[in-house]
Image: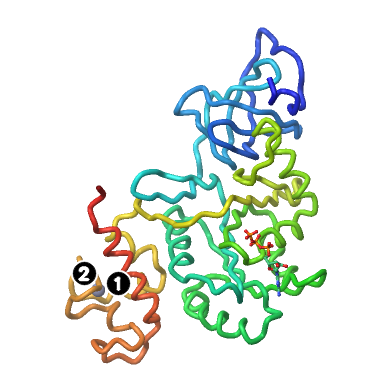
Amino acid sequence: MGRSKHSTQVGAAPATATVQPGLVVGSHGRHCLVESPDGERRICHPRGKKSQAVVGDRVQWLPSTDEGTIERVDTRRNLFYRQDEIRTKSFAANLDQILMLVAAEPDFSEHQLARALIAAEAEHIRALIVLNKSDLPGLFSPAWERLAPYRRMGYGVLPLSLKDTGASGLAEVQAELAGRTTLILGPSGVGKSTLVNRLVPSALAQTGEISQALNSGRHTTTTTTWYWMDKPAGTALIDSPGFQEFGLHHIEPTQLPALMPDIAAHTGECRFYNCTHRHEPGCGVIAHVEGDERNGNSDADISAMRYRIYNELFDELSRPAY
Ligand SMILES: Nc1nc2c(ncn2[C@@H]2O[C@H](COP(=O)(O)OP(=O)(O)OP(=O)(O)O)[C@@H](O)[C@H]2O)c(=O)[nH]1
Ligand SMILES: [Zn+2]
């Protein structure tokens, strides 16, 4: 077996093999890499559909020769995933937070940012936004301004620069990661690989090892990977491959307001208890939308862009699946 030579333990399973606890640190397709409490790692295969695991899962596994079988996935605290019309794509489980990395350039999509934040809220996962490339002043300031609504609604937003060998803001980012399990997400070109390599100097080597083990020696980048930054302190970083669209088909349109903190702040002010905040008279949300001609209010703390994103998502999630 091509895969076997990469496993760290060799030998037949004892006849009285008992299930053992483990942590999923890599996954590719149906099989995954499981780390035992002593740090040993081996490839495991799910016993069946119910024992399919994702990175971050705590599992109970049974040794079989030099590989293993996942017998059970422990109850998850949360599962961060996206869903398009056809399928669900899981990123990872049991997260303390997601770190959304965007940059002064390339220009980031606020829609994609909003979608990831909504998916995190739906699973009660904390989110942190980091704006990289603060060394590009002409581009950084407008990007920082675009994030003002997110700061206002309570998200942590941190500036960062990883240019050349210098860094600024890295210590502040590290402080937010300490003692937590963090999934890092970001569109292409924002500096995600640069950041992961800076936070986990052995990342490149580890990725090679994990994807080799999981892909019978073929090096691919389609693997979600768990990196220990500080194991005794419980600080871990999960890096997952890029994606095109962040589907939110698992969310009902009427759930959206509760998952968007700036909108949620005003839903209690609406005249109708089942207000959709799109056209109703006496709507507390509309009354707080910046520049909306329907509002005669003082305090417009919902940006026009955020309200547009709300409406577009509401329409999208209201369309019947086909
Ligand atoms: N000016 C500046 N450039 C940066 C900074 N961080 C990363 N870069 C550059 O941005 C480019 C993209 O960085 P990567 O780390 O490859 O980005 P990525 O997000 O992993 O992108 P993909 O590999 O496409 O997924 C590289 O040319 C980096 O050198 C920064 O803080 N400032
Ligand atoms: Zn309303």
Judged from the image, the quadrant occupied by ligand 1 is bottom right
Q: Among all residues in the image, which is located at the extreme front? A: 218
The x, y position of residue 122, in whole percent, is 41, 55
How far apart in space, not on screen, are marks 1 and 2 (Cα)?
8 Å
Nearest the viewer among 300 and 84 is: 84
- Going 53% across and 60% down the picture, which residue do you hit? 126
Instruction: Name the amino acid, label 2.
Output: Cys
Q: Which SS class for mark 2?
A: loop
Q: Is residue 279 left or right of residue 312?
A: left
- Queried on whether the Cβ of the residue with tag 2 lies below 8 angstroms from ligand 2, the answer reads yes
Q: Residue at x 65, y 75 (%)?
A: 159
Q: Are marks 1 and 2 in contact (CB under 8 Å)?
A: yes
Above or below for 202 versus 42: below
What residue is shown at x 31% (from left), y 59% (from top)? 255
From the viewer's perspective, is 248 left or right of 252? right
Q: Secondary structure at mark 1?
A: helix
Which of the two discs, 1 and 2, labels the residue nearer the N terminus? 1
- Give the percent coordinates (x, y) of residue 98: 56, 58
22 relative to 257 in the view: left or right? right
**Can you say whether 223 is above or below 133 in the image?**
above
Vertical side of 251 occupied by 76: above or below? above
Q: How many labels sit on residues?
A: 2
**Ligand 2 within 8 Å, label 1 CB:** yes
Decide: few, some or many residues near mark 1? Use Cα within 10 Å; few <14, some 14-19, many ≥20: many
Q: Which residue is mark 2?
A: 275
Residue occupied by mark 1: 267
Q: Quadrant of the N terminus?
A: top right
